[in-house]
Amino acid sequence: MNIKNLQFNNTNILENLKSIKNLILITDEPLSKHTSYKVGGNADYFCIVKNLEQLRKIFDVCYPKYNIFILGNGTNVLFSDEGYRGVVIKLSGELNKLKISRNLITAGSPVSLSSIIKKALESELSGLEFAWGIPGTLGGSINGNSGAFGSEICNLIKNVKVCDYNGKIHNFSSNQLDYGYRYCKFPVNGVILEADLKFKQSSRKEIEKTMKKNMKWRRKYQPIESKTAGSVFKNPEGMSVAKLLESIYLKGKAINGARFSPKHINFIENFNNAKAKDIYDLVELAKDLIYKKFKIILETEIKLIGFN
Ligand SMILES: Cc1cc2nc3c(=O)[nH]c(=O)nc-3n(C[C@H](O)[C@H](O)[C@H](O)COP(=O)(O)OP(=O)(O)OC[C@H]3O[C@@H](n4cnc5c(N)ncnc54)[C@H](O)[C@@H]3O)c2cc1C
């Protein structure tokens, strides 16, 4: 969640961030190191937050004057080559919790989906197999209501814990969330801390079978070895965006080191030292051509940060 259009002024912020006990703080950190596209300029401040206290203190220092960006595994974002004027926060440490109680898994937002799925498998709990192969964290996935094979992560949520930018903790049950195709909104703006996910009892054999089938499909149809951020555009209602893109011959279309994947047209690959701008230009090209031909406004699934 990005707080936009705020003036960023470096005076005092560094000193204030430095005063937060045991906070890992890096200045001018290349975001290309933290995103699956492997592009993006520097973040002014990059904080690795180990606990709630540190998070609240960062909010104290920054909110509402400075930009704050919560980064998961960076597999659904495109930062511009100019980087991020503000504070990028990565959650870790105590917030990385993962525990099971009967058919409920409580996971912290920085926990990877694959760790949750593996944990569920150990206890023969079924429900998240559809996400096997989605390389994100729980927080990033809830934020965009990740989905595949007709299932979505928000359907598993029982409760979710959110810290608002004033440091107040909220517990929302699933019926308080507004979610749908690749979005999830909360009654307050803030950071997802953790969620309780409901699973169903199943057998190890069945769960593994579904995981394998899903991964086989991904390997066959998606460029999972390439530097991508998954599907670039959402499907317009009742339509396949892949078909629209194919109809205007964008498969393989390249701008410098970025191209629409020859394997899956709705993925853009950084295949040869692309800049963020190359990826962005492909996004804009597709939007432009699709609008001209079909009068359809494409919406991106990936989050574009720092582009005007
Ligand atoms: C090969 C590949 C395949 C993929 N397949 C799929 C797929 O099948 N289905 C699908 O839906 N997606 C898919 N994706 C996209 C992506 O992996 C998912 O959207 C993923 O869940 C994003 O998680 P992340 O941790 O990487 O989030 P990030 O990219 O780090 O962040 C995404 C957004 O979530 C916000 N965010 C992150 N953590 C928090 C938090 N704790 N609180 C509040 N906001 C937060 C960020 O600010 C940002 O706006 C794929 C990506 C790749 C590279």
Image (cartoon, rainbow, N blue to C red):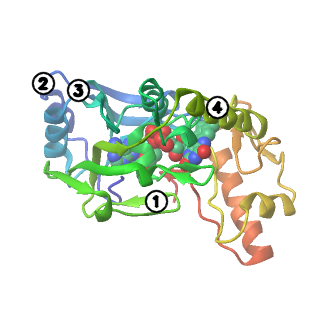
Between disc 1 and disc 3, whose residue precedes?
3
Q: In this view, does 17 lie above or below 93?
A: below
Q: What amino acid does circle 1 point to?
A: Tyr
Mark 2, mark 4: which one is toward the viewer? 4
Residue 61 image offset from top left, x and y in percent? 15, 43
Q: Residue 94 carries which label?
A: 3
Q: Residue 209 carries which label?
A: 4
Q: Mark 1 points at which residue?
A: 183
Between disc 1 and disc 4, whose residue precedes?
1
Residue positioned 38% across, 31% down in the render: 111
Instruction: Judge left or right: residue 71 versus residue 162.
Output: right
Residue positioned 19% across, 51% down in the render: 63
Between disc 1 and disc 2, whose residue precedes?
2
Dot 3: element = helix
- Mark 2 → mark 3, Cα distance in angstroms: 15 Å
Q: What amino acid does circle 4 point to?
A: Lys
Dot 4: element = helix
In which quadrant of the rendered view does residue 25 lie? top left
Q: What amino acid does circle 2 point to?
A: Lys
Q: Is mark 3 within 8 Å of ligand 1?
A: no
Instruction: Give the tally of numbered discs.
Output: 4
Instruction: Judge left or right: residue 2 versus residue 62.
Output: right
Q: Which mark is residue 21?
A: 2
Q: Nearer the viewer, residue 178 or 47?
A: 178
In which quadrant of the rendered view does residue 189 lie? bottom left
Instruction: Judge left or right: residue 14 versus residue 33.
Output: left
Dot 1: element = strand
